[in-house]
Amino acid sequence: MKIQIICTSPGMRRNGIAHPASAFYEPGRWTETELDAFRSDPSFVVREADGTVESTLTEADFALKVDAEVNRLLTIKVGELQATFSQAVQNAVDEKTAELKAAHDNAMDASGKRLDAANQKITDLEQQLAEAKKPAAKQGK
């Protein structure tokens, strides 16, 4: 069986050559390692073709089939990219929210400590004032 290689980015190089949108190759043209390289690249589709269906297609019909396959792959890729982007945005929002919450918590903790220190100072000053009034009260008798 012939091997058809469809390239979603015509002109892209793989396995040493620039590829058209679609091409048919005789069996044995590509090694299994080379075919695996095509299969692992999302820009390529590898399929076995007996040559009979393709030879009965007009060039326009064949171009439509290639375009349909390219559009199908692009739709998949767009969905994957959108999901990746959405996840990256969510991760960034979560990270920033955590940073802001930590900064808020730290500010509240620092404010609480300053308030406690101020209250202690007021208590100390009130005690000193009370102590200062005691001798004056004793002298006035």
Image (cartoon, rainbow, N blue to C red):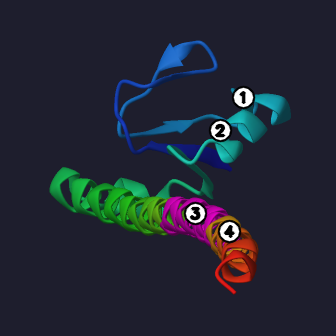
Secondary structure at numbered mark 3: helix
Identify the mark nearer the N-term, 1 or 4. 1
Q: Quadrant of the C terminus?
A: bottom right
Question: Circles 1 and 3: CB distance less than 8 Å?
Answer: no
Q: Is residue 41 above or below residue 65?
A: above
Residue stretch rendered in magenta on the structure: 90-116
Q: Position of residue 88 (x, y in %)?
A: 52, 59
Q: Earlier in the sequence, mark 2 or mark 3?
A: 2
First in sequence: mark 2 or mark 4?
Answer: 2
What residue is at 72 percent from the left and 28 percent from the top? 30
At mark 1, the secondary structure is loop
Label pair 2/1, CB-CB below 8 angstroms: yes
Residue matched to label 1: 30
Residue underneath mark 4: 109
Secondary structure of the residue carrying numbered label 4:
helix
At 36% from the left and 37% from the top, the residue drawn is 9
Disc 2 to disc 4, C-alpha distance: 58 Å
Mark 2 / mark 1, whichever is N-terminal? 1
Tell me residue 28's x, y (percent): 76, 30
Given residues 122 and 21, the one toward you in this image is 122
Mark 2–mark 1 distance (CA, rounded to whole Å): 10 Å
Mark 1 Cα shell of 10 Å, populated few (<14), some (14-19), many (≥20): few
Instruction: Determine whether, in the image, residue 61 is placed left or right of residue 104.
Output: left
Seen from the viewer's position, the closer of residues 30 and 114 is 114
Circles 3 and 4: CB atoms closer than 8 Å: yes
Task: Residue under label 3, please give it.
Answer: 107
Query: Hey, what amino acid is under mark 4?
Result: Asp
**Discs 2/3, front:** 3
Q: Tell me how far mark 2 sits from mark 3, CA to CA.
A: 56 Å
Q: Residues within 10 Å of mark 4 (few under 14, many from 20)?
A: few
- Secondary structure mostly taken by the magenta-highlighted segment of the chain: helix
